Amino acid sequence: MASEGRRILLLCDNASSHKHDPARTPNIEVYYLPPNLTAWIQPMDAGIIRNFKSNYRRLHSEFVLDRDAAGIPNPYKVNQLDAMRLSQQAWDMVSTSTIQNCWRHTGIIPELWELQRQLANATL
């Protein structure tokens, strides 16, 4: 990405594990969300996770019903590969409009637009 001259904006909460060394990644701008507010302004918490989980539960129910209809013993048993496939399908079902609406709901979009403008004017 750096060799292509691309700029990246990475949004993080202020967890201690989210360390960033700008010298190592000059093309990545890290924006830390305000402390103690992240639970209600993070887009993932604004409905994206809820939508994903709803999709996963529906797919899992269909998976169990299909296994039960096929006479497979213990139809509720899901191996890791099946769980990963169900997760991928559930994520693919999360629409872009859901993601956009969740971002809009957080109210941090205007701040991001300002940050994007600043990044566009900055020289790397």
Image (cartoon, helix red, strand yellow):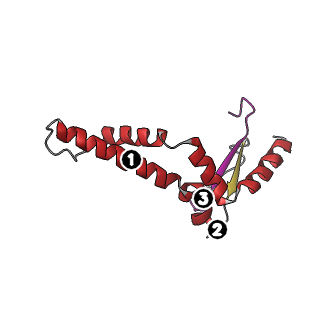
Q: CA distance from mark 3 to mark 1?
A: 21 Å
Q: Which residue is mark 3?
A: 42
Of callouts 2 and 3, the N-terminal one: 2
Give the quarter of the image for residue 105.
Answer: bottom right
Q: Residue furthest bottom?
A: 36
Could you tell me which quadrant the N terminus lies in? top right
Q: CA distance from mark 2 to mark 1?
A: 30 Å
The residue at the point 64 percent across, 53 percent down is: 103
| Boundaries of the magenta span | 1-18
Q: Which residue is mark 2?
A: 35
The residue at the point 43 percent across, 39 percent down is: 88
Q: CA distance from mark 2 to mark 3?
A: 11 Å
Give the crowd class for mark 2: few <14, some 14-19, many >=20 residues within 10 Å: few
Of callouts 2 and 1, the N-terminal one: 2
Q: Are marks 3 and 1 in contact (CB under 8 Å)?
A: no
Between 18 and 97, the one lying in front of the other is 97
Q: Is residue 108 left or right of residue 69?
A: right
Say if the magenta span includes residue 7: yes
Q: Which residue is mark 1?
A: 56
Q: 39 above or below 73?
A: below
Dot 2 amino acid type? Pro
Dot 3 amino acid type? Gln
- Judge depth for marks 2 and 3 and give the one in front: 3
Secondary structure mostly seen in magenta is loop
Between 121 and 43, the one lying in front of the other is 43
The residue at the point 58 percent across, 62 percent down is: 16
Of callouts 3 and 1, the N-terminal one: 3
